[in-house]
Image (spheres, rainbow, N blue to C red):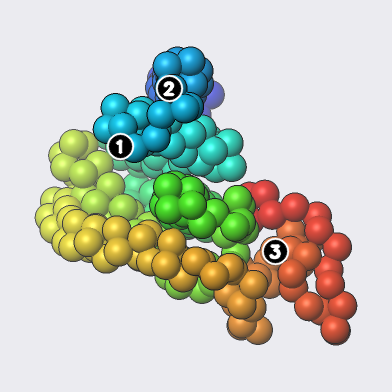
């Protein structure tokens, strides 16, 4: 490119997406805090309203169900914080915006491919974290409502290689869709725009029913516990978790239990 990356134009290009991401994160965080505070106030109000000496009353039953729903939100948010569901969309928005602006400024296709390839592993990781966290939050909600929440937090690596595959598929679809959209907006690379938009759209939106089923499947698989899940020797998430000491006390290593170092965010 003819312009220096230190020029005011490029400073603006890098600053705008970062500012937008920060604004999204702030709004989302305030929204989550507001919801949690509202849930706490609702629970306090219900506790002061319910007549504990009356059973079987439809009004009391309604209050009890409402209280359970608010408790479910608080518990799910506590064990799966909101930021774990925010990193992936913010990451995609930031680099999608940067890619569009870079193409519009004249960046060559070769340089663009190199740049997107360099961040591909991070995108897969954030997609893995997003899908896994959403799956785990859904499990906590379903189990708490049913009164069978035996494990408040299950590390994501126990979801095995399948979660990696789902995250990889979604990342490729987003890359194609985002690349096509960026080319369309920048009015460059028409073939990429057509192929990327069509293939990416099909990949992502045809996968939605499967992903929703996959999310709910975790609640069923963990009803009796997670001890037997994700222990395959060829499990990539398990290997990474144990290699970086994100181990779980229920894993047996040479006949002994590992010390618990925490599963966050694995």
Which-is-in-front pick, marks 2 and 3? Answer: 2
Residue placed under numbered mark 2 in the picture = 50
Dot 2 or dot 1: first in sequence order is 2
Identify the image quadrant of residue 250. Answer: bottom right
Mark 1: which secondary structure? helix
Q: Residue at x 87, y 78 (%)?
A: 256
Q: Earlier in the sequence, mark 3 or mark 1?
A: 1
Q: Is residue 98 visible?
A: no
Q: Nearer the viewer, residue 143 or 102?
A: 143
Return the residue at label 1. 100
**In the rendered view, does 45 fall on the left or right side of 233?**
left
Q: Residue at x 22, y 61 (%)?
A: 209
Asked which secondary structure carries label 2, the reply is loop
In the image, 170: left or right of 265? left
| Label 3: which secondary element | helix
Label 2 or label 1, whichever lies nearer to me, is 2
Assess whether mark 1 and mark 3 are in contact (beta carbons under 8 angstroms): no
Q: State whether residue 72 is above or below residue 208.
A: above
Residue 12 lies, with reference to residue 76, above or below; the image says: above
Characterize the local packing of mark 2: few (<14), some (14-19) or many (20 or more) Cα atoms within 10 angstroms. some
Badge 3 is on which residue?
A: 241
Residue 227 x, y percent position in the rendering? 64, 72
């Amino acid at each position: 490119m003819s312009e220096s990356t230190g020029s005011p134009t490029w400073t603006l290009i890098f600053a705008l997406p970062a500012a937008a991401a920060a604004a999204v994160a702030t709004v989302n965080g305030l929204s989550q805090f507001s919801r949690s505070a509202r849930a706490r106030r609702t629970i306090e109000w219900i506790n002061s309203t319910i007549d504990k000496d009356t059973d079987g009353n439809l009004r009391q039953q309604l209050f009890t169900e409402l209280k359970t729903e608010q408790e479910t939100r608080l518990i799910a948010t506590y064990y799966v914080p909101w930021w774990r569901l925010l990193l992936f969309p913010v990451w995609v928005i930031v680099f999608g915006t940067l890619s569009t602006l870079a193409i519009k400024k004249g960046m060559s296709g070769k340089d663009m491919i190199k740049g997107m390839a360099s961040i591909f592993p991070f995108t897969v990781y954030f997609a893995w974290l997003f899908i896994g966290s959403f799956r785990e939050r859904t499990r906590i909600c379903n189990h708490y409502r049913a009164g069978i929440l035996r494990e408040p937090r299950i590390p994501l690596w126990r979801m095995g290689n399948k979660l990696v595959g789902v995250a990889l598929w979604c990342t490729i679809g987003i890359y194609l869709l985002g690349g096509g959209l960026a080319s369309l907006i920048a009015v460059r690379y028409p073939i990429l725009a057509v192929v990327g938009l069509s293939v990416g759209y099909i990949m992502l939106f045809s996968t939605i029913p499967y992903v929703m089923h996959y999310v709910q499947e975790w609640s069923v698989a963990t009803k009796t516990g997670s001890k037997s899940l994700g222990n395959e020797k060829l499990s990539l998430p398990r290997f990474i978790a144990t290699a970086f000491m994100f181990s779980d006390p229920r894993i047996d290593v040479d006949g002994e239990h590992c010390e618990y170092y925490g599963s966050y965010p694995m």
